[in-house]
Image: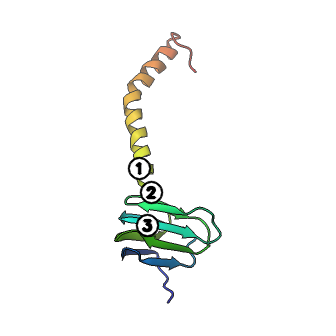
Amino acid sequence: MQVAFNHLDFLLPSNGTLSVLRPASMAVSVKRGVVWLTQDAHTEDHVLRAGETMRIRDDDPIVLSAFRNSEVELHQGQTRAPVTRALRNAAAWALRRLRPTIRQRARMARRGALPLL
């Protein structure tokens, strides 16, 4: 059976498998559990744990296999992985902390007390 979708949430039972024939531009996210992912014509396999996402870039079929009962999400389009959010939050925090220093150095540079880099 072939199914076309943009978004699919499902439970993959322990030792259960799922094949996806044309996964290009798809993201695989594991919400709960641990899933092994292998892709035809690729030498590396991947183990995804809860909270991890992997973007599939080409159209070689993939096989997902659950080490234990797992909740998995397949979706098309852009993803925002938790790491990306964490980096964005860290950068925003650093900018808030550095803003007073940056302003002070800019004032000093305008007065000629500090060369502008």
Q: State the CA–CA distance, disc 2 to disc 3.
A: 19 Å
- Mark number for residue 23? none
Q: Tag 1 or tag 3, which sits nearer the N-term?
A: 3
Which residue occupies the extreme bottom position in the image?
1
- Badge 3 is on which residue? 35
Given the current orientation, which residue lies at the most extreme right position? 41
Q: Amino acid at mark 3?
A: Val
Image height of 30 relative to 92, above or below: below
Circle 3: is it few (<14), some (14-19), or many (20+) Cα within 10 Å? Answer: many
Task: Residue under label 2, please give it.
Answer: 80
The residue lying at 42 percent from left, 58 percent from top is 52
Q: Secondary structure at mark 2?
A: loop
Identified by mark 2, the residue type is Arg
For the residue pair 2 and 112, the one nearer the viewer reads as 2
Disc 2 vs disc 1: Cβ atoms closer than 8 Å?
yes
Which residue position holds label 1? 85
Front residue of 96 and 103 = 96
For residue 58, side relative to residue 46 (left or right): right
Quick check: 86 above or below 75?
A: above
Could you give the CA–CA distance between mark 3 and mark 1, rounded to whole angstroms?
Answer: 22 Å
Left or right? Give the position of 116 relative to 80.
right
| For discs 2 and 3, the disc positioned in front in the rendered view | 3
